[in-house]
């Protein structure tokens, strides 16, 4: 891979989008490499959680690569959008927790990438936004759909229709990011949260992600059926026995993901 780096340490896979010369802008190759990185993280049983971040000091990802966008036709535009949507949906439904460590500009496709992650932690210097309308387009990697689900119609339409960038503090206030920390603490904060999630029952965490991510797009009753089914399924797992036995024996659980 040329534009994406992967590192696994302490059961955490760190995926870094690394094209700092263009502020980690997502060209088609980079979107493909992100998909590849997640497939590797999915297949690696030692990986229990994923952190996504940007290379360099300035940016998480400053959007889709505008050099490529400028050449789109109606057909390639639709294909590009569908491809990005597919890759980001695979992140959103990834069976292990995915944390975005937003270390600077997260604009356009970069903001959409952060939105597709399960949790967003931002550095104080981060700036987020969907500036597509300033280029005469709209967000095409699921941003219109995820922004409204996260923030509600009023805030989502304000941000999407102005194209304004907002700072980390404002993003935290409206719920666009979970937490803001000084830049030098960003990765350690993300790693600490990832390690905590990695120490929990992996099947339970996976079921929780599915219940929230898939269930929240269903009606309430259907979502509850999914929840009850996953709840029941976990009752067949060794992890449930281990978790409860460990509690009763007053020791730390040693989950095997079985
Ligand atoms: N696509 C392609 N190249 C990009 C890019 C993108 N989305 N974002 C930044 N770059 C390139 C710039 O063209 C510049 O290249 P150059 O050095 O060859 O001129 C380089 O990255 C550095 O960016 P620069 O604009 O000089 O940095 P800055 O600190 O002045 O501004 C931003 C930073 C993020 C505000 C500005 O780069 C920007 O507005 N980028 C586009 C954001 C956007 O609209 N994204 C949505 C796309 S759908």
Image: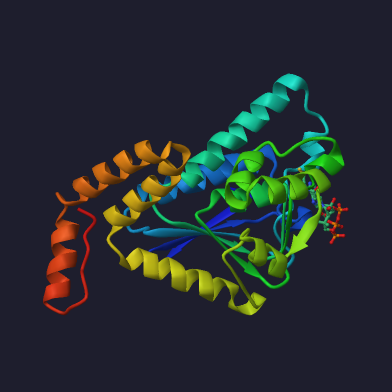
Q: Is residue 205 above or below residue 87?
A: below
Which residue occupies the foreground of this view, 170 or 104?
170
Q: Is residue 44 above or below residue 249?
A: above
- Measuring from the top left, give residue 224's x and y in whole percent: 33, 43
Task: Tell me what residue is drawn at x 13 percent, y 61 percent.
Answer: 241
Q: Going by the image, does 197 lie left or right of 189?
A: left
Q: Going by the image, does 230 lie left or right of 133?
A: left
Q: Is residue 10 visible?
A: no
Q: Is residue 198 above or below residue 45?
A: below
Q: Quadrant for residue 179, please give it.
A: bottom right
Which residue occupies the foreground of this view, 42 or 232?
232
Q: How is the image coloured?
A: rainbow
Q: Is residue 168 visible?
A: yes
- Measuring from the top left, give residue 255's x and y in whole percent: 22, 63
> How many numbered marks have been drawn onto this rendered protein structure?
0
Q: Residue furthest top?
A: 75
Task: Tell me what residue is drawn at x 54 percent, y 34 percent.
Answer: 86
Which residue occupies the foreground of this view, 19 or 96?
96
- Measuring from the top left, give residue 249's x and y in whole percent: 11, 77
Q: Residue furthest front?
A: 221
- Measuring from the top left, give residue 230's x and y in whole percent: 27, 45
Q: Going by the image, does 14 lie left or right of 247?
A: right
Which residue occupies the foreground of this view, 46 or 135?
135
Task: Tell me what residue is drawn at x 78 percent, y 23 percent.
Answer: 73
Q: Is residue 135 above or below residue 123?
A: above
Q: Going by the image, does 236 lie left or right of 153?
A: left
Task: Tell me what residue is drawn at x 61 percent, y 29 percent.
Answer: 82
């Amino acid at each position: 891979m040329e534009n994406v780096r992967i590192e696994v340490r302490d059961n955490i896979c760190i995926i870094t989008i690394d094209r700092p010369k263009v502020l980690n802008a997502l060209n088609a190759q980079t979107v493909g490499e992100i998909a590849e990185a997640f497939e590797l993280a999915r297949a690696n049983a030692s990986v229990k959680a994923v952190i996504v971040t940007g290379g360099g000091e300035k940016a998480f990802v400053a959007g889709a690569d505008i050099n490529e966008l400028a050449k789109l036709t109606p057909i390639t535009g639709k294909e590009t959008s569908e491809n990005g949507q597919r890759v980001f949906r695979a992140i959103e439904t990834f069976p292990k927790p995915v944390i975005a460590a937003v270390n600077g500009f997260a604009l356009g496709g970069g903001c959409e990438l952060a939105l597709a992650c399960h949790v967003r932690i931002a550095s104080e210097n981060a700036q987020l936004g969907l500036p597509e309308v300033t280029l005469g387009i709209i967000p095409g990697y699921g941003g219109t759909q995820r922004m409204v689900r996260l923030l509600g119609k009023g805030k989502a339409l304000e941000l999407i229709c102005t194209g304004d960038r907002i700072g980390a503090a404002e993003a935290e206030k409206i719920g666009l990011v979970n937490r803001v920390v000084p830049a030098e603490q960003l990765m350690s904060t993300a790693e600490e949260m990832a390690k905590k999630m990695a120490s929990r029952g992996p099947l339970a965490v996976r079921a929780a992600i599915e219940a929230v991510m898939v269930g929240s797009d269903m009606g309430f009753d259907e979502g509850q059926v999914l929840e009850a089914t996953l709840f029941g399924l976990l009752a067949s797992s060794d992890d449930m026995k281990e978790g409860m036995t460990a509690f009763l024996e007053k020791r730390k659980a040693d989950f095997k993901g079985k």
